[in-house]
Image (spheres, rainbow, N blue to C red):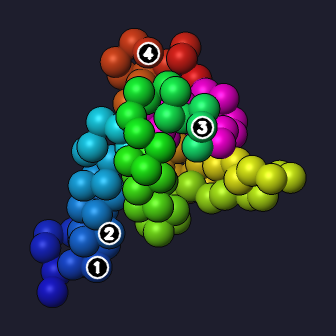
Amino acid sequence: MEHGILDSETLEKMAGIFKLLSHPSRLCIMVNLMAVKESNVSRMQNCLCEPQSTVSQHISKLKAAGLIKGTRKGTEIVYKVSDDTVKGMLVDMLNLLGKGDLI
């Protein structure tokens, strides 16, 4: 079914991304990963001031959506933003808010 110029599948995908990023902690994870390029859960936990289990749940949701990916480095897993489209959207939003220098 079409809704104006976009089909339902595209609208559902977009809505899912916006829903995922509407949580402040997940948005913070994304922006911080863009700023530092990669991070492990412990560093994210310290930055977010949330329990590691909560941060891990947010990371799992971002990973499942394909927005971030994890790579094993020795005994830890480091995460980085893997979706360039979402990365560009966040950069544009930060620039509009006058915070583009953060990343």
Sequence order check: which comes first, mark 1 or mark 3? 1
Pointers 1 and 2 in contact (C-beta within 8 Å): yes
Q: Nearer the viewer, residue 101 or 55?
A: 55
State the quadrant of the C terminus.
top right
Tag 1: residue type? Glu
Mark sitting on residue 9: 1
Apparent side of residue 2 relative to residue 97 in the rendered image (left or right)? left
Whether residue 88 is visible to the viewer of this picture, yes or no, is no
Q: Residue 28 at what x, y percent from top left?
A: 42, 33
Q: Nearer the viewer, residue 29 or 86?
A: 29
Q: Nearer the viewer, residue 68 or 85?
A: 68
State the quadrant of the N terminus.
bottom left
Pointers 2 and 4 in contact (C-beta within 8 Å): no
Disc 4 to disc 1, C-alpha distance: 32 Å
Mark sitting on residue 42: 3
Q: Which residues are magenta?
A: 28-40
Pointers 4 and 1 in contact (C-beta within 8 Å): no
Instruction: Identify the residue at image location x=24%, y=69%.
Output: 11
According to the picture, the residue beneath numbered tag 2 turns out to be 13
How many neighbours does mark 2 have within 10 angstroms: few (below 14), some (14-19), or many (20 or more)?
A: few
Location of residue 44 by image quarter: top right
